[in-house]
Structures are given as structure tokens and as C-alpha cells.
Amino acid sequence: MLVFAGSIVALVQTLVLPLVGDLPRLLHTTTSNASWVVTALLLAVRPWRW
């Protein structure tokens, strides 16, 4: 289970982190607001039972 959870976190980071520079434009918001998207996404996929 721990390996699966780690794989999901790694996959999400791989998909989202390259978009960090484009998030403000894609979401029509400021850079500081777009940074919260990354934080919220990483917290959302975090396995709670470690």
C-alpha cells in the first residue's frame, strides 16, 4: 500500500510541476493564487495512513 501511495504522489508531481509556470495563465489568476493549486493538489493525494 505504501508503494502504491508513493507512486501516486510521484505521478501527480510529474504531471503538475511542469505546468507551474503556466498555471496563472491557464487559471486566469495571479502567481501566488496558482501556487496554492499545487499545494492543495499535493495535500489531496497525500496518503493519510502512513
Image: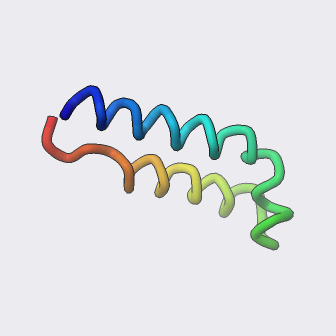
Residue 43 % position (x, y):
39, 50
Left or right: where 3 falls relative to 19 = left
Residue at left 50%, top 50%?
A: 39
Residue at left 42%, top 38%?
A: 9
Residue 8 % position (x, y):
41, 40
- The one nearer the camera, 29 or 12, is 12
- Considering every residue shown, the one lying at the far left of the view is 49
Left or right: where 10 falls relative to 20 = left
Q: How many marks?
A: 0
Residue 2 % position (x, y):
22, 30
> Quarter of the image containing the N terminus?
top left
Residue 20 % position (x, y):
73, 46
Left or right: where 27 falls relative to 3 = right
Residue 8 drawn above or below residue 39: above
- The one nearer the camera, 46 or 4, is 4
**How is the protein colored in the picture?**
rainbow
Res 14 → quadrant? top right
Residue at left 78%, top 64%?
A: 30
Res 7 → quadrant? top left
> Quarter of the image containing the C terminus?
top left
- Considering every residue shown, the one lying at the far top of the view is 3
